[in-house]
Image: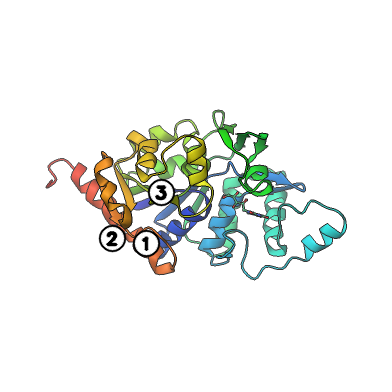
Amino acid sequence: MSDGRIVVLSGGVGGAKLALGAYEVLPADTLSVIVNIADDFVHLGLSVSPDLDTLLYTLAGLNNEEQGWGRRDETWTFMKALRSLGGADWFQLGDGDLALHVERTERLKKGETLTAITKHVAKSWGIGADILPVSDDLIRTIVETDQGTLSFQEYFVGQRCQPVLRELRYDGAAEAKLSAAVENALLDKNNRAIIIAPSNPYLSIDPILAVPGIRECVRQSNAPVVAVSPIVGAAAIKGPLAKIMAELDKEVTPATIAAHYGALLDGFVLDRTDKHLKGEIAIPTLSTNTIMSTLDDKKALAQDVIRFADSLGALSVPGAVA
Ligand code: FO1
């Protein structure tokens, strides 16, 4: 594989899994992951960044695989003590996880950017990839539901995604500034591919794409843009995606996801069980195993996606053999 940079847009567990696969198959420091920050919130006075943290834990091998968030081998002394005081226990903060939120909050108070803090955490945990919050400004997903307006974590954790979703807003996105690190990563002429991970398009990828200028950066990049479907068959692999699509009156099929990203894409990756849907998708498609149960699955999918992007890139080189 050439040494061009791979840039992944990611949020949630699906994104972290593909990022791990790419991290394992690529030479060190040729991977940049642009991460959603719209799930972030202040809880008990602490700044919590769930999608950054899931990715950091996953690439550091510290993640709790079964739970999909937080640390493995976690202890819960803090939560027990908090509950004994009648403190808010709807959002679980493990003892080790707590250290990350405390340190991030302390550094933010001292004026450090989320980008710099995330770089520090990645370095502290020996992660050789660039983990890049899309912006150092505040972006918050707001969920309009049949039970009123909910913050993202109230909807996702507090209400377990049960309310009927009517509309999503990404407060602050229109005013947010792409970080210089994200702009440089996207505009790096040495880029080999930009990959939209199999994350929830509405909850994880759209809040990234909503930051002004990012779509232009993606378009200006001469690297092929490939998305991996988070929908297999008529179901989401994990999380509330299928429910949200039904509530937004969208057909729960990979073709809906490809159309959602539209002109941004040069290629789309389907699960092999959806191979028969290729005809419904106007752009080049690859079908392969997109269910990432083992580390080998994650590595194989990353390799397949990168090779697929390479094949698209070759096509776009003037005079390339078609
Ligand atoms: N998700 C839950 O369902 N319950 C929790 O108590 C919970 C705590 C938590 C703490 C730190 C963190 O980084 C994530 C946490 N999550 C929890 C997951 C989080 O809500 C989601 O990972 C994202 O916001 C959606 O991708």
Q: Is residue 216 above or below residue 314?
A: above
Q: Horizontal and vertical percent for residue 144? A: 61, 33
Q: Horizontal and vertical percent for residue 237? A: 46, 55
Please, what secondary structure does the residue beneath circle 3 have? Answer: loop
Who's the residue at 39% across and 65% down the image?
Answer: 297
Give the number of callouts: 3
Q: Residues within 10 Å of mark 1 (few under 14, many from 20)?
A: many
Q: Horizontal and vertical percent for residue 320? A: 14, 45
Mark 1–mark 3 Cα distance, whole angstroms, equals 32 Å
Q: Earlier in the sequence, mark 1 or mark 3?
A: 1
> Which residue bears the numbered disc 3?
234
- Direction right: furthest residue: 85
Mark 2 residue type: Met
Horizontally, is 263 left or right of 112 in the view?
left
Horizontally, is 148 left or right of 65 in the view?
right
Mark linked to residue 1:
2
* Residue 4 seen in render: no
Q: Earlier in the sequence, mark 1 or mark 2?
A: 2
Q: Quadrant of the N terminus?
A: bottom left
Marks 2, 3: nearer the viewer: 3
Q: Contact, CB < 8 Å: mark 1 with mark 2?
A: yes
- Direction top: furthest residue: 175
Mark 3 residue type: Ala
* Residue 215 seen in render: yes
Mark 1 residue type: Leu
> Which residue bears the numbered disc 1?
26
Horizontally, is 5 left or right of 207 in the view?
left
Residue 124 figure quarter: bottom right
- Direction bottom: furthest residue: 73
Q: Residues within 10 Å of mark 2 (few under 14, many from 20)?
A: few
